[in-house]
Image: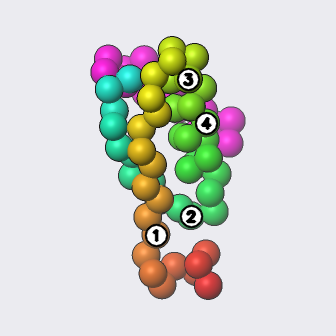
Amino acid sequence: MDVYKVVLRETIVLEPKFDRITHVLLCGGVGSITAAVFQCFHNRLKKASREIARFVVVEPSEADCLL
């Protein structure tokens, strides 16, 4: 999960309007990247007293992780 956090920190630096993102769509998978992205948004925006984006986790209905 730490690797995902590094990528997200780099993304935040490159995205000047990060705090204006309203929706985030993520693949569910096993959950580690989803958790890392949510944590990144939460930590960054809560410190700035900003509202957190809405998160939508998507996964194909026949995905093995749902079985």
Q: Position of residue 39 (x, y in %)?
A: 61, 36
| Magenta stretch prevailing secondary structure | helix
Which stretch is magenta? 1-18
The quadrant where residue 36 appears: top right
Q: Which badge, 1 or 3, is on the more N-terminal residue?
A: 3
Residue shown at the point (51%, 15%) measured from the top left: 48
Q: Is residue 44 visible?
A: no
Q: Which residue is mark 2?
A: 29
State the separation of the CA atoms marked 1 and 3.
27 Å
Residue 5 in the figure: left or right of residue 62: right
Q: Is residue 7 above or below residue 15?
A: below
On residue 59, the disc is 1
The residue that label 4 is drawn on is 39
Say few, some or many: other residues with alpha carbon within 10 Å of mark 4 (under 14 / 14 to 19 / 20 or more): few
Q: Quadrant of residue 4?
A: top right
Q: Which residue is mark 3?
A: 46
